[in-house]
Image: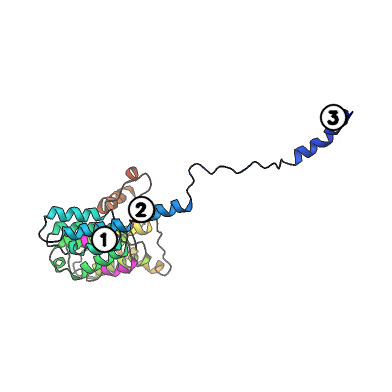
């Protein structure tokens, strides 16, 4: 009979069953439920559509055509923040030059936070050419802040150029904290230039400079034992300037100093954002 023969062979087949996994074809497996294909990922990374850009440029141009209300112009500028694009940034040039400071300040705020190259170019053009900056301290400070938000190392020299041509508190603060937004060693070099220039002047501006300088240094390199001691900072710089590297991430910063930094730049707090807040501008 074949049945006894089969039963007798089972002990011999058992080791093979344990050592060799089944090779039966089970068909295609379903894709993960939340998987995104490459096309979906590309769509998420895309900026505004051409139609959105054209519509926003048209709205801005209409708002600045003829004698429109200040509120209309401000609302058009604010709306531009939702369409970050070089053409939109360029269209805001008239807003920067508007005779009403409310409109200009809105444009500075929007362009400072718009992560496109043309936004920074328009800000630099305004900073260089607008004559109001020689008389309006608030406007000058906001211009520095808007440029600083981009965090471009190539703009670092701007913040130390003619450092004490305007000693207004808001302008000095904007220059020094603006350097803190540039996460690059050139910003630290600029802060050291500020330090040397400050203490090199008779009478100096130490009281208004040092607190801002220490805050910017802290957000760039972390908490340091040098505190407000000018000589220690100079010695530290001489020892570290050749190989200093600045992390793209905000280092550990004492809570009180972090709050000051966040408040000045309007950054979200840990609780609001859900993770560690980061300094630095939008970059090019």
Q: Can residue 71 be seen in this snapshot? A: yes
Q: Position of residue 153 (x, y in %)?
A: 34, 66
Q: Can residue 163 be seen in this snapshot? A: no
Q: Position of residue 245 (x, y in %)?
A: 42, 64
Decide which of 187, 214 is in the foreground and name it.
Answer: 187
> Could you tell which of marks 2 and 1 lies nearer the N-terminus?
1
Decide which of 17, 223 is in the foreground and name it.
Answer: 17
Number of labelled discs? 3
Whole-number angstrom distance, CA of label 3 to CA of label 1: 83 Å
| Mark 2, secondary structure of its residue | loop
Decide which of 225, 44 is in the foreground and name it.
Answer: 44
Q: Main secondary structure of the magenta part?
A: helix
Dot 2 alpha-carbon crowd within 10 angstroms: few under 14, some 14 to 19, many 20 or more:
some
- In the rendered image, which residue does mark 3 sit on? 7
Question: Which disc, if any, is residue 278?
Answer: 2
* Foreground tag (3 vs 2): 3
Q: Position of residue 124 (x, y in %)?
A: 25, 67
In the figure, is residue 207 to the left or right of 20? left
- In the rendered image, which residue does mark 1 sit on? 88
| Mark 3, secondary structure of its residue | helix
The reply to whether the magenta stretch includes residue 159 is yes
Decide which of 76, 54 is in the foreground and name it.
Answer: 54
Residue drawn at point x = 75 percent, y = 42 percent: 20
Whole-number angstrom distance, CA of label 3 to CA of label 2: 72 Å
Q: Position of residue 88 (x, y in %)?
A: 26, 61
Residue drawn at point x = 33 percent, y = 42 percent: 271
Whole-number angstrom distance, CA of label 2 to CA of label 1: 27 Å
* Foreground tag (2 vs 1): 1
Residue 8 location, quadrant:
top right
Question: Which disc, if any, is residue 17?
Answer: none
């Amino acid at each position: 009979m074949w049945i006894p023969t089969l039963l007798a062979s089972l002990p011999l087949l058992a080791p093979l069953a344990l050592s060799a996994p089944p090779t039966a074809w089970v068909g295609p497996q379903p894709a993960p439920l939340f998987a995104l294909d490459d096309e979906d990922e590309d769509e998420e990374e895309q900026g505004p559509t051409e139609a959105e850009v054209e519509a926003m440029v048209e709205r801005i141009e209409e708002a600045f055509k003829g004698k429109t209300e200040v509120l209309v112009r401000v609302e058009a500028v604010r709306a531009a923040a939702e369409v970050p694009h070089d053409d939109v940034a360029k269209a805001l040039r008239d807003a920067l030059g508007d005779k009403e400071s409310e409109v200009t300040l809105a444009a500075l705020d929007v362009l400072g936070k718009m992560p496109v190259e043309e936004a920074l170019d328009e800000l630099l053009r305004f900073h260089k050419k607008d004559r109001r900056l020689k008389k309006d301290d608030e406007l000058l400070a906001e211009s520095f802040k808007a440029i600083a938000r981009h965090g471009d190392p190539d703009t670092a020299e701007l913040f130390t150029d003619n450092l004490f041509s305007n000693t207004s508190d808001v302008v000095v603060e904007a220059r020094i904290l603006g350097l803190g937004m540039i996460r690059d060693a050139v910003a630290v070099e600029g802060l050291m230039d500020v330090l040397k220039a400050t203490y090199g002047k008779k009478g100096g501006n130490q009281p208004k400079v040092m607190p801002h300088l220490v805050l910017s240094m802290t957000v760039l390199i972390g908490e340091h034992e040098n505190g407000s001691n000018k000589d220690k900072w100079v010695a530290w710089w001489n020892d570290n300037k050749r190989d200093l590297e600045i992390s793209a991430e905000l280092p550990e910063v004492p809570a009180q100093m972090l709050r000051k930094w966040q408040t000045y730049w309007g950054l979200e707090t840990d609780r609001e954002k859900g993770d560690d807040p980061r300094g630095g501008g939008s970059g090019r």
